[in-house]
Image (cartoon, rainbow, N blue to C red):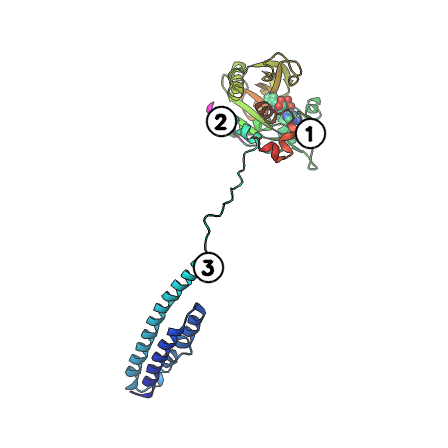
Amino acid sequence: MNEIETQLQEEQQAGLASLERVADPQALDTWKQTHLGKTSLVMTTYGKMGTFSKEERPLIGRAVNAVKVALEAALAEKEEVIKHEALLSSMASEKLDVTLPGFLPRRGRLHPINLTMREVFRIFGDMGFQVYSSPEVETDDMNFTYLNIPPYHPARDMWDTFYTEDEGVVLRTHTSPGQIRSMREYYPNPVRVILPGACMRYEQQDQSHEIEFMQFELLVVDKGVTFAHMKGTLDDFTKRMFGASAYTRLRPSHFPFTEPSAELDMACIFCGGSGCGVCHGTGWIELGGCGMVHPRVLEYGGYDPEIYSGFAAGVGIDRTTLLRYHIDDIRYLRNNDIRFLEQF
Ligand code: FA5
């Protein structure tokens, strides 16, 4: 046995002996560097192989391989032991006390406006309507002109409009511009949509008026659509929303984009129609406006009024929510008082 083989054997013995004393992952790492790292005897012997004589090479090669295999096998075994010990010690030091009381997660809930809106979607979904979203920031043309309210026409005064600094851009005052957008998208097919969303008006806030409020628009366009279809649909909606005893009336009114036009009133659900504070003694509560789509609006939407007819309605979702939950002031809906919101 030559000198190198002897050194390798000693290295194996020393390595295995020192591995016995290794007790933690850091020491194991140091051991690995010392006995199997770049500067270890095993690795430097491989590096020097070319300097040995032809006869020595196979002998030294075999010897160094044997030492390497022995050291690596011992290392793998030690790694397992150390891993297991680390697990045991972490289990001992990080005990979980399963008897400690837990924390209840805070449960969120839907806003009453959203609850009402979902009910509106459900009711009209049952009737075969699709929900169509249209922008809250609109062009003046969509919000007014294509709804048969040309510039400078006094009918524009019906809505207290927020004009933006961009010429011809407004915050929509109602969901009616969605009529034009949905007609243009669906043409030449029949239209049966509800258009929900926020509307903005520059007005004095009080018990029943907000600057920002929600509406949903109803639009049906097809051949042979009549005023009777509209009355039936709106009456059915009211019964499904407020109960079978609810009933409605249509009161003549005016909107530039419908002809004829009407207000949809529901018999007051608080007094049954005899007159009370909520209905101001009239026995009726206004839910929204409605009417047969004006021929000019049908044309702006792309439909020929000689062939097609349609009806539309715009109902306030905030006010529907007040009636549904017997809330007496619209301002509660948006002041974010958790004590109010937790009741729904
Ligand atoms: C309109 O907005 C028409 N676009 C409705 C319409 C659509 C008519 C289609 C014909 C055909 P009006 O301004 O009346 O109409 O508003 C309709 C409903 O929105 C009201 O009945 C009310 O429920 C609600 N609403 C209006 N202004 C406010 C407000 N400031 N705060 C809360 N709700 C409001």
Write down the region rendered in magenta: 121-132
Q: Residue at x 61, y 35 (%)?
A: 338
Give the left or right position of residue 159, taking residue 15 as reference. right
The mark that comes first in sequence, 1 or 2, is 2
Q: Which residue is mark 3?
A: 93
Q: Earlier in the sequence, mark 2 or mark 3?
A: 3
Residue holding disc 1: 161
Q: Is residue 219 above or below residue 80?
A: above
Q: Residue at x 62, y 18 (%)?
A: 285
Q: Which of the numbered marks, if any, corresponds to residue 122?
A: 2
- Numbered disc 3: secondary structure: helix
Q: Is residue 273 visible?
A: yes
Residue 281 falls left or right of residue 125: right
- CA gap, disc 2 and disc 3: 55 Å
Q: Nearer the viewer, residue 297 or 143?
A: 143
Mark 3 beta carbon near ligand 1 (under 8 Å): no
- Does residue 272 lie above or below 164 as drawn? above
C-alpha span from label 1 to label 2: 31 Å
Indicate the amino acid at tag 3: Ser
